[in-house]
Amino acid sequence: MIQAYDASTNPLNTVEWLFAAMECTHIGAMALSIGTIAMVDMSLLGIGIKGRTAAQITRAMETWTAAGFILVITAGLALFSSDPLRYYYSPTFRFKMLLMLAGIIFNYSVHRRVAIKGSTPLVAKVTATFSLVIWLSVIFGGLFFAFTAGGY
């Protein structure tokens, strides 16, 4: 027999500080992963670290970017477990997840190819701008969810 989910048994809902700690981990990991991607984007836009190419920055940051993604997804799943129905029924949350998936796919395909193999300045700038728009949208999606998602 399948039992209904009981949120009162989740440590994130019963240990006073745990949800806040997981939220801080989630936000910090998001800053790490998006920050390292933004460093590459700034380089592609011609306003990044001087003396280093986008390819060099990408290679130097790829472990940090991946570590950030692993942490943000792990912490995000833990947060989701605290009230899955609230998250599931929120259009803002679903939109954020769609953008996050699109951002990860874009980052490890088009963005990476343009940064490592090089391209025309126009393609580099369009790629960087699109990347920044996706990731800023993910951030704002998370903020909108946090401040607007009451009940379901």
Image (cartoon, grey):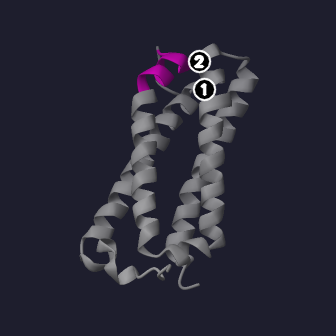
Q: Is residue 133 visible?
A: no
Work out which residue is located at the far front of the displayed protein and give it.
1
Position of residue 23 relative to residue 131, above or below, is below
Which residue bears the numbered disc 2?
Answer: 116
Residue at position x 35%, y 83% in the image: 8
- Which mark is drawn over residue 112? 1
Work out which residue is located at the far bottom of the displayed protein and give it.
151
- Which mark is drawn over residue 52? none
Queried whether the magenta region covers residue 30, the answer comes back as: no
Which SS does the magenta portion mostly show?
helix
Residue at position x 65%, y 15% in the image: 118
Q: Which residue is at the front of the view, 25 or 128?
A: 25
Residue at position x 55%, y 70% in the image: 145
Location of residue 148 in the rendering, given as x and y in whole percent from the top left corner: 56, 78
Location of residue 60 in the rendering, given as x and y in whole percent from the top left corner: 42, 22
**Residues under numbered marks 1 and 2 in contact, where contact means CB atoms less than 8 Å apart:** yes
Quadrant housing residue 32: top left
The answer to whether 2 appears left or right of 8 in the picture is: right
Location of residue 24 in the rendering, given as x and y in whole percent from the top left corner: 33, 59
Three-letter amino acid code at the position of disc 1: Arg
Q: Give the distance between the C-alpha atoms of the residues marked 1 and 2, in whole angstroms.
A: 6 Å
Three-letter amino acid code at the position of disc 2: Ile
Queried whether the magenta region covers residue 55, the answer comes back as: yes
